[in-house]
Amino acid sequence: MKLIQKVLPITNWLPAYKNEYLKGDIFAGITVGIMLIPQGMAYALIAGLPPVYGLYASIVPQIIYAIFGTSRQLSVAPVAMDSLLVAAGVSVLATQGTDAYIGFAILLAFFMGAFQLLLGVLRLGFITNLLSKPVISGFTSAAALIIGLNQLKYLLGIELVKSNRVYEILWSAIQQIDHIHWFTLLIGIAGIALIKGAKKIHKNIPGALVAVVFGTLLVYFMQLNEAGVSIVKTIPEGLPAFQLPNLSLGKLGEIVPLALTISVVAFMEAYSVAKAIEAKKRDYKVLPNQELVALGAANVVGSLFQAYPVTGGFSRSAVNYQSGANTPIASIISAALVALTLMFLTPLFYYLPEAILASVIMVAVAGLIDISYARKLWKDSKMEFLLLLATFLVTLNFSMVPGIVTGVVLSILVLLYKAAYPHIARLGRVKGYHEFRNITRFKELEVWENLLILRVDAPLTFINIQYFKEYVENAIQDSEGKIDTVILDAGPISHLDATASLGLKELLEFLKEKDIRFVLCDLIGPVRDTLHRTGLIDFIGKDNIFFDLNEAVRFITTQEGEGHKEYALQSNHKK
């Protein structure tokens, strides 16, 4: 039973379902379903797909996630960012609007889901830690600009180049500025005003649906489509049919890397919003590896019913939570509403202007641009601000996949740089106490010119042992022969690898040549075990290992103090 509950979280919450949950679930399900109909069609346009595929992707994935997911408010369906990634990747494989293009988008969902399933089964959810907050913020803000600017063609009613590079879109718009279709532009602006205005009146008013109704009625009664306003036209009726992804399309060498990239980005997006809602609800736990399994299953099974890549959306999930959703029943109701729309209501969208869908997208992505966080980083951490800025600029100018890869690589390089040059503090004793502090940060500390007392605030590994050796050697050289003892407070050193052990031995040989004593104190168990395994304990000398820093200094300066020898022999002692 525990295994079943772990694999199928629905068996946890469904048996405990209470009658009082139903009202909130129904209201939230209807609200999100109404929101999802125009949003799904709009996001399909971003992906370069016919609008109906946004509706297809809003049915089965929601139901599958409700069965396997651990978040009870996450709404899994098409999102703007993944839709643009689909367009960016698939547009180089096939011509937009063709059957091959649609086939590649569905195949991408299949492989994306397969990767997420594999990562979840292998319990590799931790890989998302490679995407730091500055990288995500820089990438998301740039992606939002790219998505928004790609909607200018629908908002202005002109033909623009479809690109992932902002400068290309803007240059194309400038060249076509004399051909703006003013009726289309006015409809788009009115759509934006309606969506924003509805939010100001009440957060639960479905502004997107209001804009869709307004735009559709306006075009229908004024016959603006005959005046050049582009409309959605016929949307196929009926539910998506079961259909295996077309593996015969080939080009798997291009599809697989794109699927892996989207699978990680999509999981990060879904997991971050799921955790944010969990922090507010506090009555269940979101499990990262199970979330990978749930999203993977949603994409794999969804692709069998003509869905393109989906994940948990920020805005929909927030509306789901705010509308009172208590369980995934709300998502099942949303899926049912979309299904009913496909079965009976698609003729109502014939006169829906594409400018309204563009306004829905623009309002949605505008909230992804987080200027306040960039300002905060500028004040708090210039290094992380530069990381955000680099990710933002690369994404903006070289497309989304290079942007996210650049952000990850730079994050790793920053991490390696900090590991290669760890903080090393030279210590002195607080007068009248047994505590030691950094002599560059505290005044009136007790120091001894013959003692070099150091603390390394990092593990000693292959990447920083050379820096530590050079630091000690330079400090001894600068002392002009006054230092006769080096004391290392090893408390912060959580790990000592083979290369660092060898480097430490080389440092000891250097110190012996200079007739300088090397003393270690405050060792934790794993590091002490490494010293024993490598034989360094004998090379250092057990008389040179002490329980704590104060004992070491007292012994060296007064030749008093006993008890450290017995401590040094306890190789398996865990501190």
Image (spheres, rainbow, N blue to C red):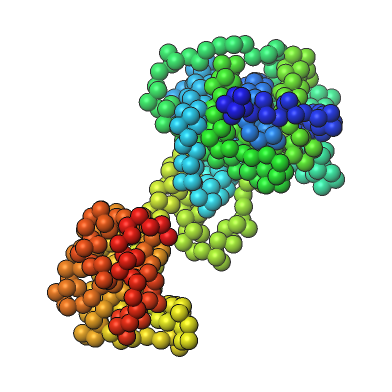
Q: Quadrant of residue 49?
A: top right
Spot occupied by residue 395 in the image (x, y as percentages of width and height): 48, 45
Q: Identify the residue at image location x=43%, y=43%.
A: 405
Q: Nearer the viewer, residue 560 or 298?
A: 560
Spot occupied by residue 535 in the image (x, y as percentages of width and height): 21, 57
Q: Nearer the viewer, residue 262 or 419?
A: 419
Quadrant of the image for the C terminus? bottom left
Q: Identify the residue at image location x=62%, y=39%.
A: 286
Q: Is residue 296 above or below residue 150?
A: above
Q: Nearer the viewer, residue 453 or 269?
A: 453
Q: Is residue 367 above or below residue 13?
A: below
Q: Is residue 35 visible?
A: no
Q: Is residue 342 visible?
A: yes
Left or right: residue 382 versus residue 16 is left
Q: Is residue 507 above or below residue 350?
A: below
Spot occupied by residue 394 in the image (x, y as percentages of width and height): 46, 48
Spot occupied by residue 303 in the image (x, y as percentages of width and height): 56, 20
Quadrant of the image for the N terminus? top right
Q: Identify the residue at image location x=55%, y=38%.
A: 288
Left or right: residue 205 versus residue 532 is right
